């Protein structure tokens, strides 16, 4: 049965293999250089979006109670979306604080 399956020469293949080192260097400034949006503006926009998402269930519930279209499913969806947004924002803030603490603990 061994005659039907060829035995590869792994060590010989590894000895003949060559590492390709012709990759261009990465440039950090080319990642997002044309956006023109500052980090502080990005944080402000994220905070505004979170605030709107958290306040949305109240607005949807008021519209439902006035009979302007949304039903209870829309209210529950808005509440779940707000809860998820707060959870994600909290986890991101925790990770940022942990990263800052690690950076501050680096001894130079």
Image (tube, grey):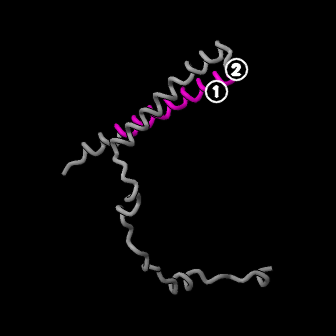
The answer to whether 33 is drawn above or below residue 52 in the figure is below
Q: Secondary structure at mark 1?
A: helix
Q: Secondary structure at mark 2?
A: loop
> Along the polypeptide, which appears first: circle 1 or circle 2?
2
The answer to whether 82 is drawn above or below residue 38 in the figure is above
The residue that disc 1 covers is 77
Q: Give me the disc on residue 71.
A: 2
The quarter of the picture where residue 24 lies is bottom left
- The part of the chain drawn in magenta is 70-97
Please rate how many residues cluster around mark 2, counting C-alpha atoms within 10 Å: few if below 14, some from 14 to 19, many from 20.
some
User: Is 86 inside the magenta-drawn segment?
Assistant: yes
**Horizontal and vertical percent for residue 10?**
59, 80
**Horizontal and vertical percent for residue 20?**
46, 80
Q: Main secondary structure of the magenta part?
A: helix
The quarter of the picture where residue 69 lies is top right
Residue lying at the far left in this picture: please name it.
Answer: 108
Q: Tell me if label 1 and label 2 are in contact, CB under 8 Å.
A: no
Left or right side of 80 for 55: left
Q: Give me the disc on residue 24.
A: none
Tell me the quadrant of the picture where the N terminus can be found: bottom right
Q: Residue at x 67, y 22 (%)?
A: 70
Q: Residue at x 35, y 62 (%)?
A: 29
Viewer-closest of 14 and 102: 102
């Amino acid at each position: 049965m061994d005659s039907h399956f060829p035995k590869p020469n792994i060590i010989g293949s590894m000895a003949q293999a060559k590492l390709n080192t012709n990759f261009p260097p990465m440039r950090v400034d080319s990642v997002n250089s044309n956006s023109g949006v500052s980090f502080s503006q990005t944080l402000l926009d994220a905070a505004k979006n979170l605030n709107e998402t958290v306040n949305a269930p109240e607005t949807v519930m008021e519209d439902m109670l006035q009979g302007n279209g949304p039903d209870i499913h829309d209210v529950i969806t808005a509440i779940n979306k707000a809860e998820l947004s707060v959870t994600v924002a909290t986890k991101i803030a925790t990770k940022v604080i942990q990263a800052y603490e690690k950076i501050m603990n680096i001894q130079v």
